Image (cartoon, grey):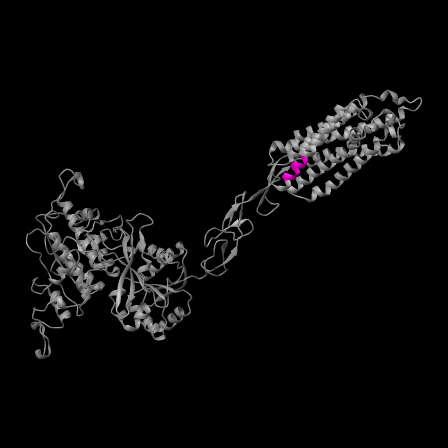
């Protein structure tokens, strides 16, 4: 570090006093610019009539030469006065200084802060970013106007992710600071999901021997981004070797010191460093500072030896009193040289860097003095709410005010220190751009400000970034390409988490984001698309009235229900005719009503099922069918009894009449009612959403509840049908008067055949087709009974009334026109 500027409180009015320290042989102009920034800030404070009225700040400057030894020597000199640098010895009655501004490098600030902390002497660094300095037990009086770098590393990780880079290399200087920074970076990268392809240390000694290995590592790496925490001097041999081998195109995330490095401005390095990005200390404007720099002149400030050296450097001349040897070979400085004739970065105030950090550091001291000076008796912060005298205060008392300052600078930015002595974290992001004429430009492309609310603290302007000529757009640096939606990431054994394979989501699962680590199951009523990137509503399937099949079955059932109703009307109209009276017309009426209900109960099977319809439809179907079959059975039994009752001495005459068939119908039906009642009471059918039967389809169906009860109900129908068929078959050869048994036999053949074929068909279908099969069975069996039993009678009643006579039914009519 070039200088450790330190403002000192001077109660005298007048101009600032200057004490010049020892200089080092090599003069670094950027450090001189920092010193001018401090002088400018002090003069601005002194010209402010409201900040420190009747108080003039002075300063002393000591050049530490960026060495710990000289920094400690200067610290003791500032503490003890102009005498010998004796620890704990003060040459004057009170220290000549109020606070110390400096150092810039952490390695130098740390030992200074240890000594100054013993006395609680305020120290404000404008460049030290080491996290160690946050420890207030070791460094209780240390503050800094430069960000501590704590959030900087998180911001670096966020910037990498902003560009989609999760596969990077890391180079760190092999010293305490480099090791500390690299460990913090690795931790931030791990938390952010960024993987390191390689992590190499740059040795402080013997870099040349390790250069070949590092170049090979970089050349064969697949990552295109390299994060570096190293000074230019450590990295220069590596850059030289990369340049000689023509290895370029990597994106370097560098240090904020690189732009000030003359080593990196060699033409062969420009191609390698093009596109470099780095976080720099936040800079703002210092109004009037450029004009202040142009007013620098050796004669303006008495005893300012630094200014004379600056003059000699920028104008390549020597002052007459410093010339040794032949004066004719030396250009003599006259003091008439014009700074406006120079075109050097010294006068560029667009990116002040650390110089800007000195500005709030000086103002922090000034505001602390203002608060101390403005203290009102009885409201002070010290014992018994006392204040201190501005002429006799102790350093720890000033530090109390200094650590609690909170003000806005001329740009409106808040300046304060947190509990660890750090200011708000703020950085500028710069891009190293090489123009067509090989000139270098440092362009601000973003910023980070912890004072902004979440989501707006990191701002990056992608369009302003100039990448290496190898890249036409934002470079890529990933180990594995992203998994598109519909796939999930699966890690590879023995490789970092950034290296993975993409596996399609399983059946029924989706991944709706890029690089999903797991697939999500769709809700029960949704199903993945073919690409498995989102869930869509499943189609709901049931036998609907809008479905062509359901509409056709509903129409057929409704139309078919009209037929038994019409026949019933015909039979009622012709209820006194022999054909209607011949075979128990009351049972016929019941049978016709039952057949009409059989056709109509098919409609309950169509439409969106509900719990109510699920319970009603099977029970209604079972009871109505048993009613019909029991009527057929009663008819068949009566035919047999009527025939045998005509025989002489038959005991069956007493069973002839309506009592027996009515009893058969009642008993058979009541048994089925009991079966269905038990079924509905114990394990009734219920509504079920079948999600597994068909992919992407929700089948709305009725679960029969108890399969045993369901098949018992059907089995009972089948039992009665079989009995009716057997009785009718045995009585099929009775005389003509009783030949209804033939038609009952035919109807039972149809009925039994339909239901025997129904069982395998019902068990082999699913969804709406299972319902359609049952409706078809109901329709077919009912139609068989209706056609075989009643159509012949309607034919006689309506078309052959001559056959509707008692004589014809007794076999005495025309023999060749037998009908029943």
Question: Would you say 206 lies left or right of 578 here?
Answer: left
User: Residue at (47%, 57%) from the top-left corner?
Assistant: 483
Q: Nearer the viewer, residue 810 or 244?
A: 810
Question: Would you say 543 lies left or right of 252 here?
Answer: right
Above or below, 16 relative to 209: above
Q: Nearer the viewer, residue 556 or 307?
A: 556
Is 470 a magenta residue?
no
Above or below, 479 relative to 648: below
Q: Residue furthest right?
A: 648
Q: Quadrant of residue 438?
A: bottom left
Q: Quadrant of residue 177?
A: bottom left
User: Residue at (14%, 67%) from the top-left corner?
Assistant: 310
| Residue 105 position in % (x across, y down) | 24, 61
Dominant SS of magenta comes to helix
Which span of residues is magenta-colored?
A: 550-557
Is 553 a magenta residue?
yes
Question: Would you say 620 lies left or right of 643 here?
Answer: left
| Residue 805 position in % (x across, y down) | 84, 25
User: Residue at (33%, 73%) from the top-left corner?
Assistant: 243
């Amino acid at each position: 570090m070039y200088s450790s500027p330190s403002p000192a409180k001077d109660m005298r009015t007048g101009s600032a006093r200057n004490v010049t320290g020892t200089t080092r042989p090599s003069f670094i102009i950027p450090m001189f610019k920092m010193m001018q920034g401090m002088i400018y800030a002090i003069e601005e404070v002194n010209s402010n009539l409201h900040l420190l009225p009747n108080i003039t700040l002075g300063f002393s400057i000591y050049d530490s030469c960026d060495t710990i030894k000289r920094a400690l020597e200067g610290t003791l000199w500032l503490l003890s006065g102009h005498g010998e640098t004796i620890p704990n010895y003060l040459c004057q009655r009170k220290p000549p200084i109020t606070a110390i501004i400096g150092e810039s490098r952490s390695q130098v600030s740390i030992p200074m802060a240890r000594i100054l902390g013993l006395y609680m002497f305020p120290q404000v660094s404008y460049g030290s970013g080491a996290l160690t300095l946050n420890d207030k037990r070791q460094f209780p009086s240390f503050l800094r106007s430069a960000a501590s770098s704590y959030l900087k590393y998180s911001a670096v990780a966020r910037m990498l992710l902003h560009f989609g880079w999760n596969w990077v290399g890391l180079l760190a200087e092999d010293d305490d600071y480099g090791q500390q920074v690299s460990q913090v970076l690795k931790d931030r990268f791990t938390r952010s999901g960024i993987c390191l392809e390689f992590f190499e240390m740059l040795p402080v000694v013997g870099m040349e021997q390790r250069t070949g290995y590092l170049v090979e590592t970089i050349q064969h790496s697949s990552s295109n981004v390299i994060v570096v925490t190293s000074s230019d001097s450590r990295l220069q041999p590596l850059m030289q070797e990369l340049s000689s081998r023509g290895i370029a195109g990597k994106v370097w995330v560098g240090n904020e010191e690189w732009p000030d490095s003359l080593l990196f401005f060699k033409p062969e390095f420009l191609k390698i460093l093009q596109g470099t990005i780095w976080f720099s200390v936040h800079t703002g404007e210092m109004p009037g500072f450029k004009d202040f720099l142009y007013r620098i002149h050796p004669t303006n400030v008495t005893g300012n030896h630094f200014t004379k050296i600056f003059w000699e450097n920028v104008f390549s001349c020597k002052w007459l009193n410093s010339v040794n040897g032949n004066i004719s070979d030396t250009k003599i400085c006259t003091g008439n040289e014009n700074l406006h004739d120079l075109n050097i970065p010294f006068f560029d105030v667009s990116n002040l860097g650390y110089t800007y950090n000195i500005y709030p550091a000086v103002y922090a001291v000034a505001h602390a003095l203002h608060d101390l000076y403005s203290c009102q008796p009885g409201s002070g912060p010290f014992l018994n709410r006392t204040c201190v005298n501005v002429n006799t205060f102790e350093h720890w008392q000033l530090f109390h005010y200094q650590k609690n300052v909170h003000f806005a600078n001329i740009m409106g930015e808040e300046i304060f220190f947190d509990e660890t002595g750090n200011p708000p974290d703020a950085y500028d992001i710069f891009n190293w751009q090489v123009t067509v004429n090989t000139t270098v430009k440092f362009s601000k492309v973003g910023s980070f400000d912890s004072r902004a609310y979440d989501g707006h603290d990191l701002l990056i302007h992608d369009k302003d970034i100039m990448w290496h000529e190898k890249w036409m757009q934002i470079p890529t640096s990933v180990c594995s390409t992203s998994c598109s939606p519909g796939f999930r990431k699966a890690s590879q054994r023995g490789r970092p988490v950034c290296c993975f394979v993409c596996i399609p989501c399983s059946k029924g699962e989706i991944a709706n984001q890029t690089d999903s680590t797991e697939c999500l199951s769709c809700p029960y009523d949704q199903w993945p698309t073919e690409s498995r990137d989102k869930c869509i509503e499943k189609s709901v399937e049931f036998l609907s009235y809008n479905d062509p099949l359901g509409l056709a079955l509903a129409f057929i059932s409704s139309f078919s229900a009209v037929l038994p109703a019409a026949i019933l009307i015909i039979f009622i109209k012709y209820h006194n005719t022999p054909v209607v009276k011949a075979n128990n017309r009351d049972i016929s009426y019941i049978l016709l009503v039952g057949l009409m209900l059989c056709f109509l109960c098919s409609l309950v099977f169509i439409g969106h099922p509900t719990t109510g319809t699920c319970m009603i439809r099977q029970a209604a179907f079972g009871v109505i069918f048993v009613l019909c079959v029991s009527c057929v059975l009663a008819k068949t039994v009566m035919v047999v009894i009527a025939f045998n009752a005509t025989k002489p001495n038959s005991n069956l005459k007493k069973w002839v009449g309506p009592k027996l068939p009515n009893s058969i119908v009642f008993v058979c039906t009541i048994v089925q009612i009991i079966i269905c009642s038990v079924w509905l009471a114990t394990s009734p059918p219920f509504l079920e959403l079948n999600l597994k039967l068909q992919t992407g389809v929700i089948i709305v169906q009725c679960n029969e509840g108890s399969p045993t009860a369901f098949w018992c109900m059907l089995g009972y129908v089948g039992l009665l049908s079989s009995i009716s068929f057997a009785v009718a078959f045995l009585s099929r050869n009775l005389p003509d008067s009783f030949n209804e048994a033939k038609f009952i036999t035919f109807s039972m053949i149809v009925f039994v055949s339909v239901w025997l074929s129904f069982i395998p068909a019902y068990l082999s279908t699913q969804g709406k087709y299972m319902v359609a099969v049952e409706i078809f069975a109901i329709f077919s069996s009912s139609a068989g009974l209706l056609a075989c039993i009643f159509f012949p009678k309607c034919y006689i009643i309506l078309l052959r009334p001559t056959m509707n006579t008692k004589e014809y039914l007794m076999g005495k009519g025309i023999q060749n026109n037998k009908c029943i």
